[in-house]
Structure formats: structure tokens, C-alpha cells
Amino acid sequence: MKNKAPIRKYDITQCALYKCRTKKRLEHLLCLEPGGLKIIDSIIRYHKFEIDKKHSDEKREITAPDKILKAIQRRILYLLHRVIRPEWLISGEKQKCYIDNGKAHLDGKYVLTVDIKKFYDNCTREPVYQFFVQKLKTSPDVAKKLTDIITYNGGIPTGCPTSQIMAFYAYSDMFSEIADLAKQCGCKFTLYVDDMTFSSTKPFSPNQLRQMIDCVLRKYGHKPKYPKVKYYGPSDYKPITGTVVTPEQSLAVPNGLQNTIYNAFQTLKPLIGPETCSEEDAKQILSLKGQIQAARNIEEGKFPEIGRLTSQIKVPDVQSASNQKRQIRRHNKKIRIKQRAATK
């Protein structure tokens, strides 16, 4: 597979939002109709739902924007995406994923991992506003409108297109200070949302670094999730954001994902045979195939037998059925539009 060409990036001063001083200009940049910002409050709507936490019985609440608001947030994300950000930032970056976070520390024999406690819950509106005023040099009224669009109930919602990038930008000074501390201690630093990883080929004082990180976080209204502050030595397996760095300095699939795949396969194993399974079973099979692929992204060729047997299960074409339903809805919508036009 060919490597993707690197994305060309530019300084923040070249961002289209830089020094945006009028609402008329902002409307143009966000592809809104003239006067669209006047009614922006009426389209700021969200809905909440829960998802399972990975390899856990706990639930995570997601606050997601409605369709129209989401489109505007995506436009803001597009305008910010090509701005140069630090190499140590992994989350929210195109051509990077959680596996890159593990790969970055393959040569680290000594590793310290620090999670931030309830990071999104404590990402407040004010740092977002200050980012637009101080870093992007927008006028206060433009900064307020942008902040209104991407925050909710005084904070950064978890389910927006802009969530990850704005959580970084709102606290970029905090993370930069932590990156400087890592450098002082001779450590490599990476950030994946609220997961901070520090590694070194040589021994360092984890307690000293941990205390300094604690002070910086508290200065900005955050604090570590103390049970998840872990230090690993050369002979330890080191869990890093959905991957494991082995003592042999290679990446391995975490036990949690392995157990999930084994258990899911045992549930679906009776379906191996000539009969086509139900649509509900097909969704579980697709989920299992996705999990196997996730494992193989970490360890090439992982679960060969489970993959082979799973591929033998005959499934209905769920995608075709979904497309068919979508086409029916579109057809019915066209009929309704024509009927309304005929009655006018």
C-alpha cells in the first residue's frame, strides 16, 4: 500500500479565520446566508445518547449536534485543519490514529502515562473564547459567535466534529508547558485527547515529572486521574491508548480487545454453516470483523483462524438493504414535494 502524501500545512496566521473582524466576513467563511448569524441561536441544538466504553460495562454519554449545526462545525474544522500543530499531538490529526501513539514510544524502555480526570467535563467556554481572541486575533463579537457554535452548556461537547481540535486549542498553552517539562526530563511526549504519554530510553524520575505535571494541570483547572497514572520499566508491558508496547519493543493487541473478539466469536460460532443468518446477527458479524481488523492494524495477521471461520458465515447484504430503504425514503420525499407543489 502506498503511503499517503503528507498534508500541506500553514502557520496559524494564514488561517482564513485569522483576524476575522466582522460578522459579515464570518458568515462568508462559514458559508452562511447573509444575516445567518442572527438566527444562529435557533439552530444550536443537541441530542444525547450513550455508548459502551471500550472493553467495559460502563457507559459514556455523548452530546452531539443536530444536522445543521454539525455542518457549520465541520466548516470550522475544515478551516482549522491545515494549521500547523505540534508533532506530539496525535488526536484529531489527519493521517494519524491511536496506533501512532503507541508506535511513537516503541523505543521507550521507561514509560509514564497520565490521564486527565474528566477532561471534557472541565473544558470550559472561556479558554475557547480566548483562543479565538488571542491566537486567531478575531474581534470579540466574532469570537463570541464562534464560541457559541462549538460550545454547549458552558463547555466543549463530546460529540462535535470540532471537539478534539478545540479541546487542544483551548488548552494548547497547558499542553505546551507539559511538553517543555517532558523535554527537560529527557522524555518524548505525545498527546491523544486527554492521554499523555512520556517515554525515555534512559531512567528518569517519574515522581518528579508527575508532580510537575500535576502543578501545570491544576493551574489550568484540571488534574490527573490518579488511578491511571502509571509508570513502566523495561520488562513491563506498557498499555498506550488502545495498544501495548512489549518489552521487546513491538506493538501488541491489548488483552481487552482480544477477550472481546474471543467472546464475540464464541457467540457467533453456531452460525457457521449453509444457512444465511439474520440481519441482526449480520450486524454483530460486521462488528466482529471490524474488531479483527482493528487487531490486525496493530499486529498483522492476528486471529487467522477466527477470521477464516467468521468469513464462512453467510450474511445478508445489510448495506444493500440500507441503501434500498434510503432510496425508498428519497422517492417518497420527492412525491411529497411534488404533491405540495401541485396544491400551491
Image (cartoon, rainbow, N blue to C red):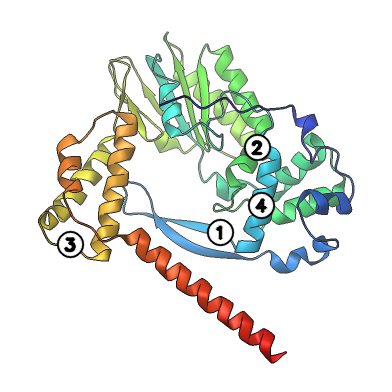
Nearest to the eye among marks 2 and 3: give it. 3
Q: CA distance from mark 2 to mark 3?
A: 44 Å
Residue 211, visible in the rendered structure = yes
Kindly identify the amino acid type of the residue bearing the numbered disc 1: Ala
Comes first in the chain, label 3 or label 1: 1
Kindly identify the amino acid type of the residue bearing the numbered disc 4: Gln
Q: Which element is circle 3 on?
A: loop
User: Residue 218 placed where, x, y %?
Assistant: 61, 36
Kindly identify the amino acid type of the residue bearing the numbered disc 2: His
Q: Residue at x 76, y 63 (%)?
A: 40
Q: Is residue 228 above or below residue 340?
A: above
With 234 as the anchor, is 2 left or right in this view? Answer: right
Query: In the rendered image, which residue does mark 1 sit on?
Result: 64
Nearest to the eye among marks 3 and 1: give it. 3
Q: Which element is circle 4 on?
A: helix
Query: In the rendered image, which residue does mark 2 sit on?
Result: 81
Q: Quadrant of the C terminus?
A: bottom right
Q: Which element is circle 2 on?
A: helix
Question: 47 and 212: which one is in front?
Answer: 47
Comes first in the chain, label 4 or label 1: 1
Q: Quadrant of the N terminus?
A: top left
Query: In the rendered image, which residue does mark 3 sit on?
Result: 276
Q: Of the numbered discs in the image, which one, if any, rests on residue 226?
A: none
Kindly identify the amino acid type of the residue bearing the numbered disc 3: Thr
